[in-house]
Amino acid sequence: EDSINTNLAEGLWSFASSDHDIVTDYHPLIQELGLQDKIAAFNSVEISTAGVSDAYGKVKQFSGHFNPFPVLLGSGLNKGAPIWWSPTRTPGLIDGTPASLFKYAREKLLAKVVQINHGGDDGYFCWRGYDPGTNTASDPQYSDNYELMEIINGNNKDNWLSELTIWYGHLNFGRKTIGMAVSDSHHRLNGEP
């Protein structure tokens, strides 16, 4: 209820759920509160991935957080229960590469768009060796099958410059990535925009 009221108080007419590794459906609560004419919610999930390093410390699998949305409740592996994103837990569905994750999000979760979350200093773009000066990545497993990227994440003022630099790199090379500013409020926070 706090998420709905906070978004309404901020003047937003829609928002996406983005809890880590679980699909949260706000539709029944919006109906119960009688607010369906004032605000809409999109189901989503913040996919948390963990990298696996080889003997030399090089990450062989992706690391980072991603939001596919909207997703249909029940369209994933376990109808909204936590989704585990590792090849050992989802054999045949994802193989540890970003391309397989993005494909899964679109084909199985029925997402229309994929967002890279806080991918700068220690996220997806960093792990994949993305260079905004050349619009290339040193890691051959880098996938550009996404439409959105976070630039500003909540009240974290430490990493938005790296995010902005990456976004400008996209724009400078003609890639029309949509920059996002998000609250990243997975729980009630003081001072969170």
Image (cartoon, rainbow, N blue to C red):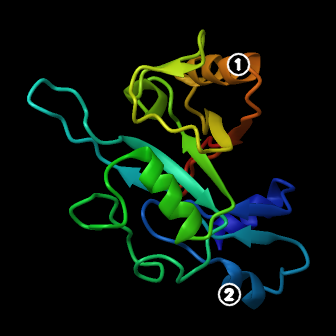
Q: How many marks?
A: 2
Residue lying farthest left?
55
Instruction: Judge by depth and name the residue closer to the eye, 12 or 24.
Output: 24
Q: Are marks 2 and 1 in contact (CB under 8 Å)?
A: no
The N terminus: image quadrant: bottom right
Instruction: Judge by depth and name the residue closer to the eye, 43 or 59.
Output: 59
The amino acid on which the numbered mark 1 sits, given as a three-letter code, is Tyr
Residue lying farthest right?
37
Image coordinates of residue 114 in percent, x first then y, are 61, 51
Residue 19 visible here: no
Residue 18 visible here: yes
Label 1 sits on residue: 168
Image coordinates of residue 83 in percent, x first then y, are 38, 68
Q: Which mark is residue 73?
A: none
Label 2 sits on residue: 28
The C terminus: image quadrant: top right
Q: Secondary structure at mark 1?
A: helix
Image coordinates of residue 71 in percent, x first then y, are 61, 70
